[in-house]
Amino acid sequence: MSGRYQGPDGTVIPTPAGGGHALVALGWVPLDAPPETDEAAIPEGTPTKSWKVPQLKAYAAEQGVDLGAATKKDEILAILAPEPAPSTAPIVPVLAGEAAPATPAE
């Protein structure tokens, strides 16, 4: 920790050599601490690999999804955004100039 610290009585001092960890334990507050970021802020849209684990967990909680024992990003993504199943429709080649055959209704 570096910067300045404010004591319980309002006194402000620079960080002593060796850091301010001992000051914090005594109730001093760092004044120059970097702002905290909210790593769990949920991005717009559906979960992707670019999301961080705290964001995925927050999304799951918001959606009421039980992640079970999933803790890793890939495990969580598999629950939240499973890959679509491959199509079982037959592949029918179409020659240039021909109309594509009608797809049977399922």
Image: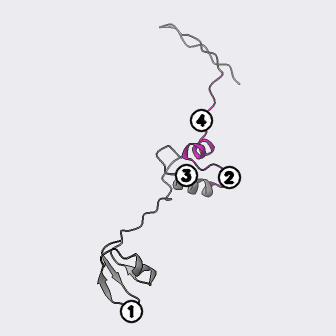
Give the mark, 1 or 3, whose residue is nearer the N terminus: 1
N-terminal of the pair, mark 4 or mark 2, is 2
13 versus 34 height, above or below: below
CA gap, disc 2 to disc 1? 47 Å
The residue under label 2 is which amino acid type? Asp
Which of discs 4 and 1 lies nearer the camera? The answer is 1
Identity, as a three-letter code, of the amino acid under mark 4: Glu
Residue 56, labelled with which disc? 3
Q: Amino acid at mark 1?
A: Asp
Residue at (68% x, 52% y) in the render: 66
Q: Which callout, 4 or 1, points at the residue further toward the start of the chain? A: 1
Marks 2 and 1 close (CB-CB < 8 Å): no
Residue of label 4: 83
Residue reaching furthest bottom?
Answer: 9
Give the residue pinned by disc 1. Answer: 9
Q: Position of residue 29 (x, y in %)?
A: 40, 80
Which contiguous range is marked in magenta?
63-88
- Compared with 87, 78 (above or below) is below
Q: Position of residue 16 (x, y in %)?
A: 30, 79
- Residue at x 57%, y 47% (from the top left corner): 72
Of callouts 2 and 3, which one flags the residue occurring earlier in the amino acid sequence?
Answer: 3
Give the CA separation, mark 3 to mark 4.
16 Å
Disc 3 + disc 4, Cβ < 8 Å: no
